Amino acid sequence: MPQLPKAYDPAAVESALYEDWRAAGLFHAEPDDDGEPFSIVIPPPNVTGSLHVGHALDNTIQDVIIRRARMQGRNAVWIPGTDHAGIATQNVVERQLAAEGTDRHELGRDAFLERVWSWRETSGGQILDQLEKLGASADWDREVFTFDAPRSAAVREVFVALYEQGLIYRGERLINWCIRCHTALSDIEVEHEDETGELARFVYPLADEAAVPAEVLAAVGDEDGGLVRAPGGQLGIEVATTRTETMLGDTAVAVHPADPRYRTVVGLEVRHPFQDRTFTVVADEYVDPSFGSGAVKITPAHDPNDHAIAERHALDVIDIMDDTGRLTEVVGERFAGQDRLAARGSVKDALGEAGLLVRVDEHEHSVGHCSRCGTVIEPRLSLQWFVAMRQLADKAARAVRDGRTVFVPQSRTGPFLEWLDDLHDWCISRQIWWGHRIPAWYGPNGQIRVSREDIHEEGWVQDEDVLDTWFSSQLWPFSVFGWPERTPELETWFPTSVLVTGYDINTFWVSRMLMISLWFTDQVPFHVVHNHGLVRDEHGKKMSKSFGNVIDPLDLVDTYGADATRFALLRSAAPGADVPLAEEWVEGTKRFANKLWNVGGFVLSRLGETVDGSPRQEGLPPLADLPLEDRWVLSRLYAAHIATDAAYDAYDWATVCRTLFHFLWDEVADWYVEAVKLRIYGDDAAAVTTARRVGRFVFEHVLRLLHPVMPFVTETLWRELTGAAGGRDSLMVADWPHADDDWHDPHAEDGFAVLQDLVTELNRFRSQNGIAPSKRFPVVVTSEEPALLATEGPLVSSLAGLTELRVVEALTDAPGTTTVRFGAGQAQVSLAGLIDVDAELARLDRELARARDDLARVEGKLANDGFTSRAPAEVVAREREKRVEAADAIAGLQERIAALTALTG
RNA sequence: GGGCACGUAGCUCAGUGGGAGAGCGCUGCCUUCACACGGCAGAGGUCAGAGGUUCGAUACCUCUCGUGCCCACCA
């Protein structure tokens, strides 16, 4: 008799199976393979990355989808690859250089890039190896990189084409500057956080107090007066700021034109306290008169709003800091050279000394941080390259509104469209070295040429900057297939079928892929965007190193196996929700793998064809010939199949897992396996054969349905059961199963439910009376289903551990017996030597109380005229039935209590 | 400031206009011939709170409270 080890040991099978699949070429697809094309491109992980649970979830989902598509006979390909991740990667290598006591400038650009490439060769991309441990069935022969030659060619083409179309331009604008990364950032690379800071209120003194009209002077100090006296006595206008140091670059104070307090002040000159200059009070609609003093200091070089005001009023623009965030000499000797955050304090102190500081308040405001390094971002005026987004965004929005690309869950659509609607131009130039160099050359006389070919002419130099890393990522869905070449891969697999990603990069990446793909190919890049949730800890908290709640998926794979890890992630991945995960939950799913393993062990040893050497028979015997439990399990399989298939189609992984878990454990293992033992251990050869065929069939069907989620354990069992050697006979490429409508059999389900109910009630009776499971006893029943119970008596006896189940028309009121009620009747048990009567009496009392509650509830309902007259007839009828049942139950219980009481005397 | 989710058993979550569910945890019994990574039973919830619609609300509507997230150039 074939035997499996008692416990499933993932480590013993996973890597060998994976290598077997790979060696057989099962991960690889060609454009001219059979089947309808189906494609997924991986969201390319950064080469700096190592696998975290978010990747594990994202790639497990992709693997599930691609494995099922493959089984469904599609020409399915999953393209793997990595992202060069400009700033992130440069930072990693710069840190190494710093540890070596050098930096990139000392090394020089070419040597630095060489260094990054060599780092990438050796330790970049380990994340893809880690994906293999999870079972990822990506087509490794097709691995691509955002910075390899074909992808770089695509980048060059897109940049030049957009420039020629006037959608890429160079201009001086306010951008986000990271003083640590020394580069410009796009708006979405800035993360805003609410922080409590100091709001300093201070006074700009009037340059010429004599120029102030008398009535204004008279109002000073009044609540409605515009001008104030500073603590030091100077007359001036009060302003407020959280970035006090920016006052060193102020070139105006603005008030609202309709603000009566300042009507006469507009046009007056104020004096800069620390610099030898004055500037004007201007009127601008932007100012909110109800906020603070109603006057705003204007720093055109370091605030977007201020910059806009400056343009309207032709104000001077003074850039006060250098690339590293230190104040330059333009601010004056006193503050030059200070870091901008240090200057914040020293400027405040200086204002106090000058008697101009009115007061300092605590103030909640939001501060932008670099998404790469966390440094506080400084808005700066800077000459950069931009993409004009409006036309691209409109085209993308139209595609989404038309449903050419749909979001799953659908609730992500709204926020996405809103975001597209107010999109600003995209700053794409970065002042770093690692990335696609901007294909612009500057001539000796200031000319600019943007070119598909490098320019080597005398006097022409290429722009030093590189492109935002997302500029190349946005091309991914078509660049991976070789665009702009019209390759067979591109023709076959583009647009891709589905993009799987967390919703957190919808703006960074998904939006840009949609826009650029539609612009250049006139096609959406993917038909579906499946947004899964973000993996969090078991209390829904973000995983982070500082909380110490990070789970390493590779540890999980080592400890519990890839299947358990995958299942644990997926079972929590309900549509639209974040994904909580705790290590002990993975232990739970390992138990499920083990359960599956042991059911497999049973099927193999008791139901396998090799048990008696008879030839394997495919398919099922005629349904009409099958006993009740077989028809029941097939009907349940049908339901499980329909629910599972629908959930797969809906990207509802939690439901896929829940359905299969429940069917396999609660129905197949707990009931069907137990039920089938009656035949297996009996001596009816024909019944044994039938049981084997049906049992195997059902189990193999489950293996197929479960394979995309738990590829390793299902494949291992499949090979054991079918004798398949692997390769092309693998479960991985077996047909996706089909559920036959004929299996659906409500009659069998109802019938088996009667048996389940009776068995459960007898078990409860047993448990509550402390009757050992090994103790067998006879039972007499009366039931609405006498024929069913007569036929299935042996099955019930087998399941409930009875010596005999005898069906009678009516129970005789025999002394020394008790009655166990079940849904379809009553079972009578002789008590002699079986139970503790007092315990049974106590149990009956509890049951009686419950039955009385039931009756009261139903009667209350039926006493309600509204209910009886307005509720649907069948609902009322059901309640009437319940009333009868409850009354019967009470009567029955009372009789039994009386009988037992009489017995004890 | 705007928007969107969510609040069901100790924990994490399903669910439905008419009898409160699962997994884990907890309690009792059981080493029964697939499985102790197991089996059989059990305890535990005024389905956040208040109002409304309805014959009937955990479910639909409104509000309140709480939690989470996204967006936002609020000096």
Image (cartoon, rainbow, N blue to C red):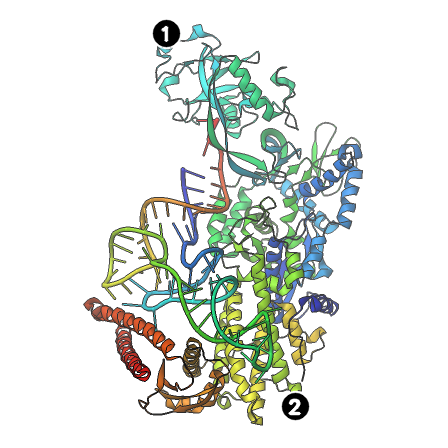
- The residue under label 1 is A214
Q: x and y percent of residue A502 in the render?
A: 56, 52
Q: x and y percent of residue A328 in the render?
A: 64, 21
- The residue under label 2 is A614
* A732 over A554 or under it: above or below: below
Q: x and y percent of residue A691 in the render?
A: 56, 87
Q: Nearer the viewer, residue A91 or A607?
A: A607
**Which residue is at the far left?**
A865
Q: Residues within 10 Å of mark 2 (few under 14, many from 20)?
A: few
Residue A77 circle label: none
Q: Which mark is first along the chain, 2 or 1?
A: 1
Task: Please state which amino acid type lies under the numbered disc 1.
Answer: Ala
Q: Chain of mark 2?
A: A
Task: Please state which amino acid type lies under the numbered disc 2.
Answer: Ser
**Quadrant the C terminus of chain A occupies:** bottom left
Q: Nearer the viewer, residue A423 or B74?
A: B74
* A26 over A104 or under it: above or below: below
Residue at image position (76%, 37%) is A99
Q: Is residue A637 visible?
A: no
Q: Nearer the viewer, residue A648 or A682?
A: A682
Under tag 1, what secondary structure?
helix
Residue A56 location, quadrant: bottom right
Under tag 2, what secondary structure?
loop
